[in-house]
Amino acid sequence: MIQTAGRISFCLLTLPSFAACAVAAAPSSDDPLAGKSEQALLEGPRATSVASAVPGAEETVSETDPNFVAAEHAYVDPDAAPVDGALTDAWRAQAQADGAFVGDPGKTSRTVEAEREADDPLYVRGSGDDDEIDMNDVKQSQIGDCWMLAPLSAIAMQNPQLIRDRIADFGNGDYSVTFRKITGISIFGPPSYTEYEIPANDSFNPGVGHAKPGDLDIFGHGEIWVELVEKAYATYMGGYARINGGPPAEFFEAMTGTPAHVYSGSDFTGFASGLAGFEELTFEGLSARLESGVPIVTCTRANFGSVPSYNLVSNHCYAVYRAYTQYDRHWLELRNPWATNHAKITFEEIPGLMNSVVYGWGD
């Protein structure tokens, strides 16, 4: 976890079933991330900026990006085989060096596609869901992208229509997801932004370790909207390796086109103290924002020291699900993007446990 441009970036490493944000278990000897430092994971895979990773951006696209096909001016599907039609040893080695999770080197895109049902539903309204797009659909797996899946979960809870509006279904397994890049901020009106419509399809490489399907339909097929958004954002960034750790505000802004509010570090001295002009740093302010429909994410410290961890995972991001008062204590319920191991802390414990609190948008 490092501080860059006023944002907190979170790095998440591989666990047997989930991606965590710190080394909670020793990596296996065949783990492509074994031996990589947190700093290396953050600086290596994410060396290309969003602007330079997007076809059509003003900046020159890097010709050294292995996922970019200069002749076609388009990105290779990050779940499919490279241009030559097979996962070659050279491509596999480069992907592993970049921190990617790659599967059987003998697989081709056709083999991968055959491993998924052609009629996987985009959305399924599961039992207890308020909408067919629900925060319970988000199930992080081995890619270290809690920093984007926690915000996605929070948006699904607060404004599922926003996600629905970003996904276009063209039939036959072809989709697109539209992301926004803020290009200007004005005190006289809303920010300006450029939209990028990123193609995606329903062919998912099982060796990648991407998000798991959501609710099942009556035929046992899992909904794929979370996988599609994750895949499209990986394409937008230049490959799955480049979403293995990052700042939650970045993904909030890519989805909304609105600046996120980020509180971290010295800001925490104002939590629970009610500093003038910082109502979001009070329990009442946070509760009001949550109640009004603002998606909120909070991310843990690299270590907790002597502070009780309350089922929290270090260097990990959570969606704030509920805020309430009970027995004169202010409680926050946090949803883990793993879809398990959820947590509950008091608001007053934020400075000791958390590294940042991120509001998806302001007033």
Image (tube, rainbow, N blue to C red):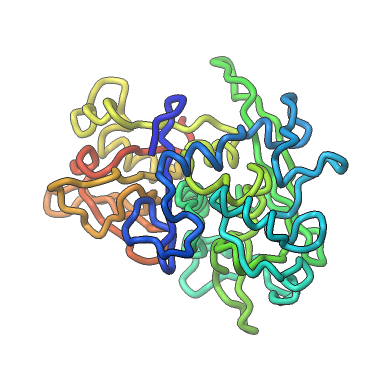
The structure residue drawn at horizontal position 23% and vertical position 27%, both measured from the top left corner, is 270
The structure residue drawn at horizontal position 82% and vertical position 67%, both measured from the top left corner, is 172
- Choose between 192 and 1: the one closer to the eye: 1
On the rendered structure, is 233 left or right of 298? right
Q: Position of residue 340 (x, y in %)?
A: 37, 66
Is 214 situated above or below 99? below
Is 186 situated above or below 279? above
Q: Position of residue 236 (x, y in %)?
A: 67, 43
The structure residue drawn at horizontal position 63% and vertical position 78%, both measured from the top left corner, is 221
Q: Position of residue 206 (x, y in %)?
A: 61, 69
Q: Residue furthest right?
A: 71
Q: Quadrant of the N terminus?
A: top left
The structure residue drawn at horizontal position 74% and vertical position 24%, both measured from the top left corner, is 58
Q: Position of residue 76 (x, y in %)?
A: 76, 51
Q: Quadrant of residue 215?
A: bottom right
On the rendered structure, is 155 left or right of 358? right
Residue 165 seen from this side: no
Is 153 situated above or below 359? below
> Disc count in the image?
0
- Choose between 138 and 76: the one closer to the eye: 76
Residue 129 seen from this side: yes
